[in-house]
Amino acid sequence: MNEQSNEKKLIEGEDFYYTPEGYKCFTEKYHLKKGFCCKSGCRHCPYGFDKKTGEIKK
């Protein structure tokens, strides 16, 4: 049973969207809900992580 509970369901347009290439891209709102930086260099990272330097700038 790997179904997500109603609390954890991702909402398209709010938590993520699909890029023109077809990839799922998480929004800033999703990252804030998650509560921490994964240090993957996400496009909408609210924590200011810079993948090139490996540092959080905010």
Image (spheres, rainbow, N blue to C red):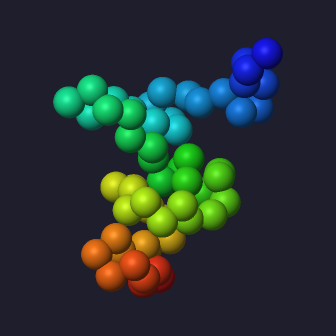
Q: Quadrant of residue 9?
A: top right
Query: Is residue 50 at all visible to an observer of this figure?
Result: yes
Left or right: 11 with respect to 44?
right
The outermost residue toward the left is 20
Q: In the picture provided, is 36 more to the left or to the right than 4?
A: left
Could you say where residue 16 lies in the image, as x and y percent from the top left?
45, 36
Along the line of sight, the residue nearer the viewer: 17 or 40: 40
Residue at 56% x, 65% y: name it. Answer: 37
| Residue 17, x across and y down, in percent | 39, 33
Identify whether 57 is placed above or below 23: below
19 in relation to 27, above or below: above
Q: Position of residue 19 (x, y in %)?
A: 27, 34
Q: Who is closer to the viewer here, 24 or 30?
A: 24
User: Can residue 6 be seen at all in this image of the molecule?
Assistant: no
Please report the residue visible at 65 percent of the width from the left and 52 percent of the height from the top: 34
Q: Name the spot of residue 2 as percent of width and height, x first.
A: 73, 20
Q: Residue at x 34, y 55 (%)?
A: 43
